[in-house]
Image (cartoon, rainbow, N blue to C red):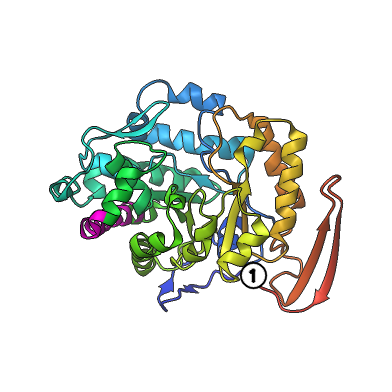
Amino acid sequence: MSNAALRAPGGAAQAPGRFDDSPFVRACRGQSVSRVPVWFMRQAGRSLPEYRAARGPGSILDAIAQPDLVAELTSQPVDRYGTDAAIFFSDIVVPAAAVGFGVDVAPGTGPVVSEPFRSAADLARLRPLEPETDTPYVIEAVQLLSRSLSVPLIGFAGGPFTVASYLVEGGPSKNFTKVKALMHADPALWHDLVERLTDMALASLRSQLDAGASAIQVFDSWAGILTPTHYAELVLPATRRLFADLESSHPGTPTILFGVGTGELLGLMATAGTSAVGVDWRVPLDEARLRVGPTKAVQGNLDPALCLGSWEVAAAETREILVRAGTAPGHIFNLGHGVLPETDPGILEQVVELVHREGHAGLDVNVGLGVDVDVEVDVDVGATRIDVDDGAGGME
């Protein structure tokens, strides 16, 4: 790929990025790759002994406020696993906590709110985020990583529904009754809330990109609890605005939208304006490709629980996913959700090696150059046969 400036969808010129030719960035953009890229959500975490040694006790928000520590924790899985991207070590509630809404992250529980969002008066507690003043430690950590990493850094923020759910419910929820009640009983207030949260996410993401992040993932992790109709009416408009405004300020930036249990929402998520859509383990990847359409990359989708058993089980499932990913460009291998704390790091090391060795989606050989490549993989033994036929390339 040339280092000439890219042309963004809106027509604005995008300056070439340091990692434009990396497998991760190219896969996000639906371009041919030298190998299928792989990284893991929550790859920096309690499954790594070096993480536990460096992180120490205390709130994760305290750790996030230490740029040197964040840079170390973010880099650890790249050094150990050889992943093709690093995910910034942070939390989706950092912006809300930084503006003083009263959010903490309780060990073993997750985000908790001392005074949950209940009325229009609580909007005043969500003032605009000013990253240089409110989260300078995020900017400094991203700057450190952008200088030291040899792979792209993925910045991130929480999606509007998921962050709102924590603020309204007061913490993690199984049924999301309070946030659903607000959405439907007072849609005007709901709109004002998600617009505030979208503005905060946008400010945070822009600050991460300005500091050197190469890509963005938005975690709307719990959006799958919604029906397609309610998602389309009450969440998708704010999500679209987030990505449209991000494209306006940072054209051509690779972006990913992810949620758990969103199989019935994938088609809608594909209209949000992202480069790629993250897929959990419940939808076969070939079906996911059909649902998001030929212009979007897909990311996923190994069940994290299958990394807790034997290597033979994890390997078989990894190979099945690689088969279902096909040969067209646009697949980033990942888990269907975050790495579980009890995961053996050795299993993930072998998953990375296997994906790099046996993945075929978008490989440079003929793919993306007007020729289709058909790959058949024997899931039991990993034997591979490649047949080349004339035809149209591209993401399909």
Residue 316: x %, y % from top left: 76, 43
Q: Which residues are magenta?
A: 185-205
Quarter of the C terminus within the rendering: bottom right
Circle 1 residue: 395
| Residue 203 at x, y percent in the picture | 29, 55
The structure residue drawn at horizontal position 72% and vertical position 44%, both measured from the top left corner, is 317
Crowding at mark 1 (Cα within 10 Å: few <14, some 14-19, many 20+): many
Residue nearest the observer in this picture, 351 or 258: 258
The N terminus, quarter of image: bottom right
At 69% across and 66% down in the image, what residue appears?
A: 328
Instruction: Give the main secondary structure, helix, strand or loop, of the magenta stretch.
Output: helix
Kind of element beneath mark 1: loop
> Would residue 201 be counted in the magenta stretch?
yes
Place of residue 198 in the rendered image (x, y in percent of width and height, measured from the top left): 30, 56
Horizontal arrangement in the rendering, residue 283 relative to residue 102 (left or right): right
Q: Residue at x 36, y 63 (%)?
A: 246
- The reply to whether the magenta stretch includes residue 311 is no
Judging depth in this view, the residue of 256 and 191 nearest the camera is: 191
User: Taking 111 as reference, is 257 left or right?
Assistant: right
Query: In the drawing, does residue 232 fall left or right of residue 99?
Result: right
Residue type, label 1: Met
244 lies above or below 35 = below
